[in-house]
C-alpha cells in the first residue's frame, strides 16, 4: 500500500471527528471516578470500541453517500477518497466490514470483562449490536435514517446518553439520574459537530434528497438550532455542577466558554457554506476541551 493510499484511508476515517468519541468516554470515566469507582481497563476498552464505531460510521457514510450519488463535485467539504478514485466502492465495503468486526470484537471483550450478571450481558450485547447497525445504516440501506433528518438524535443518543452513561455504568454497576445532565450536554456538543457538517453541505444535500435536520430547518433556523445546542449543553453542565458537585473546580469547563461563544457567533454571522469548512474540526476540539475540563473539575472536586 502506497503512502498516498494510507493517507487516504486515514482521511476516510475522518480523524477530526474522533475527539467526539474521546469526549464521551472521558466524561463517563470521570463521573465513575467521581463516584469512587474507576477501572482503567474498562475505560480503555470503552474508548477503543467507541473510536472504532466512529470510524465505522465515517466509512459507512462515505460508502452510502457514494452509492446514492450524494457526493458530487459541488461538495464543499474535503474530497473523500472514493471521490478521488483512491479507494473504490469494493475496497471501502471491505474496510467497512473489517472495522465492523473489530468493533464487535472489542465491544465483546469489554462486555465479558465488565458484566456482573446475565441482564447486563444481554443488555450490552444488544446495545453493541444496535450501535454497529446504527453506524452502518446512517447512510447505507434503502431507508437510511441520516437521509430522514434523524442523525442528530442518533448522535445525542450514542455519543451522549449511551457513550457517557454506558461508560459510567460498566464501572459503577449503577444507574444515577444525575449523570443524564453531563451525558446530554456531551451529546448536544456532538450534535453541534454534525450540524456544522450539515449546514456546510445543505445545498448539495437538498439537491441529492438527503433531508438532514439542517435541510429541513433551512439555513437560518439551522444556525439558530446550532446556537441552541451550545446554550443548552452549557446549561446542563452548569446545573449539574450547582446541584450535584457544589465546588469551584466543578466549573472549570467555563474556561472554554470564550471559544464556544466565539464559535457560535461566527456560525451565526457567516452564511457562506465555504466559511463553515474549518468550523467542524474547531467544534470537535471545543467539545473535547469542554469535556476534558469538566472531567478534570470532577476529579479535583
Image (tube, rainbow, N blue to C red):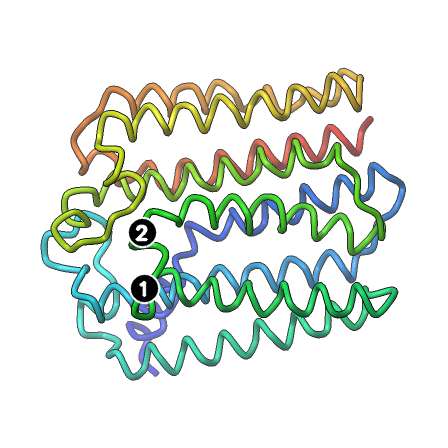
Residue sitting nearer the eye, 91 or 236: 236
Distance from the alpha carbon under mark 1 to that under mark 2: 8 Å
Vertical relation: 221 (above or below) 37 = above
In the image, what residue occupies the spot 52% across and 47% down? 20
Quadrant of the drawing holding the C terminus: top right
In the image, what residue occupies the spot 43% across and 62% down? 57
Residue 110 on image: x %, y %? 73, 68
| In this rendering, position of residue 178 left or right of residue 204 | right
> Which comes sooner in the sequence, label 1 or label 2?
1
Task: Residue 26: give its label.
Answer: none
Residue 29 on image: x %, y %? 74, 46
Residue 136 on image: x %, y %? 42, 67
Q: Which residue is mark 1?
A: 143
Few, some or many C-alpha atoms within 10 Å of disc 1 (few <14, some 14-19, many ≥20)?
Answer: few
Vertical relation: 194 (above or below) 177 = below
Q: Which residue is mark 2?
A: 148
Amino acid at each position: 500500500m502506497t503512502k498516498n493510499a494510507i493517507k487516504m484511508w486515514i482521511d476516510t476515517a475522518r480523524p477530526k471527528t474522533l475527539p467526539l468519541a474521546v469526549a464521551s468516554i472521558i466524561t463517563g470515566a470521570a463521573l465513575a471516578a467521581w463516584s469512587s469507582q474507576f477501572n482503567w481497563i474498562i475505560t480503555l476498552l470503552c474508548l477503543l470500541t467507541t473510536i472504532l464505531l466512529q470510524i465505522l460510521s465515517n466509512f459507512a457514510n462515505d460508502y452510502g453517500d457514494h452509492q446514492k450519488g450524494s457526493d458530487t463535485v459541488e461538495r464543499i467539504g474535503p474530497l473523500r477518497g472514493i471521490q478521488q478514485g483512491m479507494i473504490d466502492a469494493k475496497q471501502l465495503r471491505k474496510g467497512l466490514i473489517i472495522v465492523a468486526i473489530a468493533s464487535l470484537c472489542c465491544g465483546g471483550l469489554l462486555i465479558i470483562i465488565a458484566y456482573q450478571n446475565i441482564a447486563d450481558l444481554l443488555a450490552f450485547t444488544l446495545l453493541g449490536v444496535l450501535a454497529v447497525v446504527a453506524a452502518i445504516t446512517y447512510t447505507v440501506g434503502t431507508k437510511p435514517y441520516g437521509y430522514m433528518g434523524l442523525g442528530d438524535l442518533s448522535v445525542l443518543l450514542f455519543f451522549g446518553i449511551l457513550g457517557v452513561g454506558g461508560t459510567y455504568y460498566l464501572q459503577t454497576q449503577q444507574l444515577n439520574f444525575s449523570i443524564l445532565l453531563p451525558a446530554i450536554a456531551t451529546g448536544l456538543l456532538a450534535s453541534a459537530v454534525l450540524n456544522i457538517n450539515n449546514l456546510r453541505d445543505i445545498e448539495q444535500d437538498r439537491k441529492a434528497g438527503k433531508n438532514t435536520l439542517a435541510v429541513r430547518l433551512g439555513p437560518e433556523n439551522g444556525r439558530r438550532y446550532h446556537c441552541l445546542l451550545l446554550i443548552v449543553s452549557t446549561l446542563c453542565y452548569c446545573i449539574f455542577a450547582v446541584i450535584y458537585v457544589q465546588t469551584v473546580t466543578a466549573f472549570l469547563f467555563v474556561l472554554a466558554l470564550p471559544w464556544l461563544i466565539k464559535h457560535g457567533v461566527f456560525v451565526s454571522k457567516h452564511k457562506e457554506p465555504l466559511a463553515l469548512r474549518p468550523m467542524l474540526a474547531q467544534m470537535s476540539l471545543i467539545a473535547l476541551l469542554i469535556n476534558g475540563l469538566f472531567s478534570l473539575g470532577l476529579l479535583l472536586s
